Image (cartoon, rainbow, N blue to C red):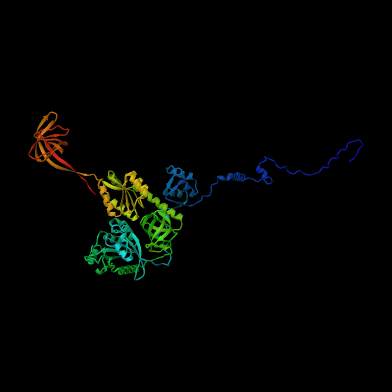
Amino acid sequence: MVRRPGGAVRPVAAPKTTHKPGPQKERGRLTLTTALNADDVRERSIASFRRRTQRLKGHASNEPKEKLIREVTIPEAITIQELANRMSERAVDVIRMLMKQGAMHKITDVIDADTAQLIAEELGHSVKRVAASDVEEGLFDVVDNSTDTEPRSPVVTVMGHVDHGKTSLLDALRHANVVSGEAGGITQHIGAYQVTSPETGTKITFIDTPGHAAFTAMRARGAKVTDIVVLVVAADDGVMPQTIEAINHAKAAKVPMIVAINKIDKPDARPERVRTELLQYEVQVESLGGDVVDVEVSAKNKTNLDKLLEMIALQAEILDLKTNSERPAEGTVIEAKLDRGRGPVATVLVQRGTLRVGDIIVAGAEMGRVRALISDQGENLEEAGPSVPVEVLGFNGPPEAGDRLAVVENEARARQVTSYRAHQKRENAAASISGMRGSLEQMMSQLKTAGRKEFPLIVKADVQGSLEAILGSLEKLGTDEVAARILHAGVGGISESDVTLAEGFNAAIIGFSVRANKEAAAAAKRNGIEIRYYNIIYDLVDDIKKAMSGLLAPTLRETMLGNAQILEVFNISKVGKVAGCRVTDGTVERGANVRLIRDNVVVHEGKLSTLKRFKDEVKEVQSGQECGMAFENYGDMRVGDVIECYRIETIQRSL
């Protein structure tokens, strides 16, 4: 720095540097995002990349795509949208093809399997058809590959006519008393019991079926699950209608039969007569040179019971009954009921495999998880093997007697099967109610029954088998003029909803071995709905028969009283015309119905208002006497006309 005298100090300029300034950062709007991402390097967005690839491929987009050939699974009905998805085609193309065939459709429309197959094949895809019923595949009758089969107990069904001593015979075999618990000594349920043979120690499962005619369906089921049939015939009664039916069931089920001739302790017992009568129905016992085993027993005196068990064991040995107990269980529901404390309870006979607590089961349209297994002696079991009858707790609802039970792997499969079956059941019910689907005969029968009176009923029973028997009996009562109309039939006690339904249709409620709960009874009393309780099926059917007979139109019968001939017609003031007649035959009564016949043609029908003998009003005039007659509201009488007098009687009909 040069200092001049008297001058101000001038600063020296800073030396020039060659430093290059850095690229200026673009400063846009200051937002929270820009402040936080200040140091980030900006990249291209995905959308930008997409646009770029689209620009590059723009010319190639017109090139035809490679066609995907698929195996398309087609159910019985499918929506157009779903079909297009399964074929990887556009729904528009499918609709266009349908339009070519002359059918206009929307994307949500349902088409049948045949149409869907045509379209799929036209588009070059292969088709695999499946039915809704395929969900049931593999549930039953899966062949065992396993060789580790083991002998199982025989299942014996006891059949025979009502009051021939079937249950008493079982009682004697199992040292219990079932008869005392049955109303009127009639078995109305199917019972299943297991008995150990004292000789061999082998177990035998007995199924006791009711003998009454109404239980045909139940007995048929009893034969369906059985290995051997024991036909009980009373020695003092011989072969009866249900005995013949039992023989037919056994033949239809193709199972061996053992004849137990019961009540041989009675003084009028004639076992030989029974053996001879059985010959008429192609049942030839061994003593008469046949191959059917017969044993003379007495349930009362416990005679020859060991011999009967021995014969059953022998027959079972010949049959060589074996099964694999390790597989998932299969069985048949013998009986089902709704128990107030335990919920739906089903008596199940396990036929193959082992049923365990915790298994997921399906029977008919009902599913559930086994909560408990109870033996016929009332003990709790952890598992039930082949030929073991058990009560199963855990169903969502009571299944129907005769339904087959199967164990499934998971709840999803169980739901799939039960929803399909429930749908089928609903469809069948709807079809039977509407009666739209049907043959010409059905249409004719509907025309015939259109004018018939209906007797509305609500039926509640304790078990499914009894319910079915009652419904079958009521159906048989119907004629072309009057029929029972079952509004609702179910298992369990009578509830308030049943009373409400009865009120809507003015129906009667029938309880068979069940009672109405407090609320239902009060509602019924309030609304004047009749609830009838029964525990014997005969009484129930007879009462309904009488009630339905009341709906039958009475028959009108005409009784001829007599004839009279007009001799003269008088005109009397204030009275009108009076005919002077002579009674030619019979009698003429005042107030009776009359016909005026002229030249053998009826010209008037009415009532006799006046009947006079001389000047007195009389009640009747005998043949050969003369009298004066006047008709109600009719005066055109002529000499020579014949008056026919008759009475109409009303006769009440019965079914």
Q: Residue at x 38, y 51 (%)?
A: 425
Furthest residue in direction left, as rendered: 624
| Quarter holding residue 320 | bottom left
Furthest residue in direction top, as rendered: 573
How many numbered callouts?
0
Q: Work out whether residue 161 or residue 154 is closer to the camera in this orientation and state it.
A: 161
- The image position of residue 102, as x and y in percent, is 42, 42
**Any part of residue 479 in sight:** no
| Quarter holding residue 562 | top left
Query: In the drawing, does residue 42 fall left or right of residue 531?
Result: right
**Any part of residue 165 in sight:** yes
- The image position of residue 328, as x and y in percent, is 43, 61
Q: Quick check: 620 above or below 317? A: above
| Quarter holding residue 298 | bottom left
- The image position of residue 360, as x and y in percent, is 44, 57
Q: Quick check: 292 above or below 607? A: below
Query: In the drawing, does residue 635 fall left or right of residue 155?
Result: left
Furthest residue in direction bottom, as rendered: 199
- The image position of residue 309, as x and y in percent, is 32, 68
Quadrant occupied by the N terminus: top right
